[in-house]
Amino acid sequence: MSSWDRRQFLKASCGTAAAWSALSARKVRGANEKIIVGCMGLGGRGTYLAEAFAHRDDVEIAYLCDTDKRRFARAREAVEETQDRSPKLTQDFRQILDDKNVDVLINATPDHWHGLGTILACQAGKDVYVEKPMSHNLWEGRQMIEAARKYKRIVQVGTQSRSGPYMAQAREVIRSGKLGDVHIVRVFNMMQHPMQRIGPDQPEPDGLAYDMWCGPAAKLPYNPSRRWLNFFEYSCGPIPGDAVHQYDLARFLMGDPAYPKSVSGRSAIEALKDGRDCPDTQFALFEYDDFTLLFEGALWTPYMKKIPGSIRDSDQFPDWPFCSTKIEVCGTKGFLWIGRHGGGWQMVDSDSRIVQSIYGRQADKEHQQNFIDCIRSRKPANADVEQGHYSTLPFHLANIMGRMDNAPLLFDGKTETITNLPEANRYLRRTYRKPWIVPKQV
Amino acid sequence: MHRLIYMLMGVLVVLLSTTQASWLDLGRVVVKQETTELGGVRVVIEYELAEGKATTAHPAYVFVRYSSDEGETWSLLLPECLRGNGFALVDKPGQKQIFFWGATETQSVDPKQLKFHVRALRIARIPAGRFEPRAVPGNGCDTSRIHEPVTTVPEFYLADTETTVAMYTDYLNETGTNGLGYNTRMARPDRCGIVQEGEPGNYKYTVTPGRENYPVTYVSWYDAMSFAAWCGLRLPVEAEWEKAYRGGTYLDGDQSKQIPNPIPDRQYPWGDEAPNADGIFRCNFDGQEDGFSHTSPVGHFTKFNSPYGVCDLAGNVAEWTLDWYSTTHHAGLDGFRILRGGSWMAPPEACDAITAATALPIKESSIMGFRLAK
């Protein structure tokens, strides 16, 4: 970016809002009316969200849903401890969608259920809080936007750091020009994952609706040691699944540009050759109109550390060189280190001195509050589905690059297609298993 | 009676220990002090362990705590400090004695001021040897761990029952005068039943009548660890827990190999029948049809014990273990711990031998409790 274009920044920031101004809510809950919520997916994150929303006075959790009945107890107990009414338990999320009293679906399923679960919820008139990465494939992400817009639904993606006040301050620092012209943004996701050891297939256990768990994905023989996160059938990969937090922040900091024009680099399985098909290494260069974004992701870097909880919620900074989830913003006058999930940020001037330091805090509560506020106001949420799409899309492209022998890809945002390698477009959309097909017309 | 003992034996009776509900009843415990010629003051604790209270398979675990400041603070007398036949694992009934020579080392100005509490619980012996672990990843919540199943565990002991409200209340009254180890939800009479009264620094705890024998709940992993250390015990590791649930390949252990386990890969402690098969309710799971809408008294389902006579491993409360849980996303960061056994809120199939749950160690829940191991 030759210089920070304030008009462009404002345009990017407000574009979504402008689009939303034409929308009117079909149903707006009154300020004193409780918002009725159904939770789909009761793993660690889903249980956390159920409990967190149950703690709110203005929310009632009416349903807890998981394909595995074994997951019910922990979430149910957490909810019952905080609200008077017991939630209904179901293994079929359509029961939630069929209930006209339900306002919101929280979708905290594995990746392969994010898209269709959200689209069906929008069609049923529910607002949606969907966990990241919001889509299994690029085309599906666009369909989610279409559904949200068509049915005038609030769809918030679970990239909660976007709602952190410290991030807004960092964005303002960049916008003000204190860093000079920003040409390069580096996003990191350097983790350590274990090798999986795939054992023999097993009978489907009692209490698990395995067909429903598979949903739009192929129904492979049940094998719990085959970790779904490592396979494209169910996932867009363990690196994107986590890194989308930082990527979303990087876009936020840079004024929310929509599309990269190209991606080049390398997606590969370098270290964890354990039967997975999702990469354990992704080094990708994304070319935006005004800057270049370098993404470095790996699953075999034990010396890189996630920001510990003790730092996330206190006046401390991570050890930046070895921070696995940092963002680096490189300007002509200065430099920013930024940590997700409350890591805070520090600005360095041209003499390599730290000249400003802002501590951060985790922003889950702010993000949830924003969602509730938007349900009532019908204004777009901080991490609106469209922003979620633009933050997830680059990872879909990096994955496709890897599946095309790491050929550089040129991307056309208007059509959301790859222009230089037409055969790569077959990876834009998955094969859906009946009856769980994302429709072309949502 | 105190004086009679004093007159007859020429020693000083210091205190008769109290016994609390849910601890194993040791009957009348007499604590005396004697002056020895060379060893200084010797404390002698005597009790009679009644027939049936202890066997080789189910010994009594006896531990002693003492106070040298009129009951203000209490400490565990480590087994290494004791002699006699009546402490740690006691596997035969009869007259028991515990000798303690360290009275002059307890910082008490006057050894006569020493107070002792003697408590015991029943604990099952799990012989060393192989078993068939089936806690494969994915059957519970842990879909990520590289599972290196432990197939052989050394001899260990696991409490016959889950730790009860009365036991935990007893603990709180010794250690919780500042409120440590207690949270207000424990007062819920339907789910726990421990009431705190008084002011900080002087808190007292009472059991809601009738709740003595129910499992304690709303205890964090740290609470459970503290209680275990207070007893001189620990929590079981996950492999131990599962072996106690299924039984080893040989129920008498690999040393003798005389009693093969008829169902070594059993799904439930009693076998493979579902907890509610044929209208028979074998443990406390979700719903009221088993007779309990919340927790049930420990030992209620003894007909459906594990092969070692351990009760309520399935259902009632999920039990904290020592094991860490790690996910690929949170390895080494969040410190989740593993719980086993399902609960009164879990569906029957979640009370099986393979389902695991995870929770942060600070979590306090009405479906979570613990059981002691040695």
Image (cartoon, coloured by chain):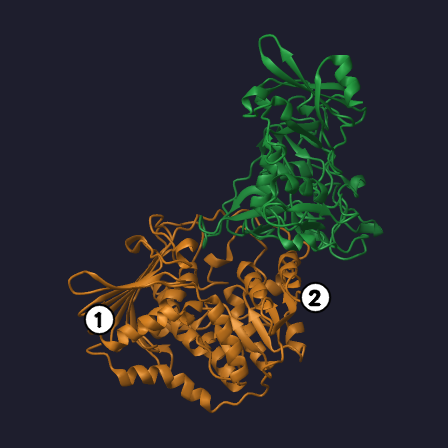
Chain colours: A orange, B green
Kindly tell me whether residue B234 is visible in this rendering: no
Query: Which badge, 1 or 2, is on the more N-terminal residue?
Result: 2
Q: Is residue B185 above or below residue B170?
A: below
Seen from the viewer's position, the closer of residues A282 and B120 is: B120
User: Whole-percent x and y of residue A342?
Assistant: 39, 62
Mark 1–mark 2 distance (CA, rounded to whole Å): 53 Å
Residue annotated with mark 2: A86
Q: Residue furthest bottom?
A: A22
Chain under disc 1: A
Labels 1 and 2 positioned on one and the same chain: yes
Residue B247: image quadrant is top right
Circle 2 residues within 10 Å: few <14, some 14–19, many ≥20: some
Q: Secondary structure at mark 2?
A: loop
Is A45 left, or right, of A266 in this rendering? right
Whole-percent x and y of residue B146? 49, 45
In this figure, which residue is indicated by the disc labeled 1? A179
Using the rendered view, name the quadrant where residue B25 is placed: top right
Q: Is residue B12 left or right of residue B325?
A: right
Where's the N terminus of chain B, which quadrant?
top right
Residue A366 location (% of width, % of height): 47, 70
In which chain is the residue bearing label 2?
A
Q: Nearer the viewer, residue B9 or B54?
A: B9
Image height of A265 relative to A22, above or below = above
Q: Amino acid at mark 2?
A: Ser
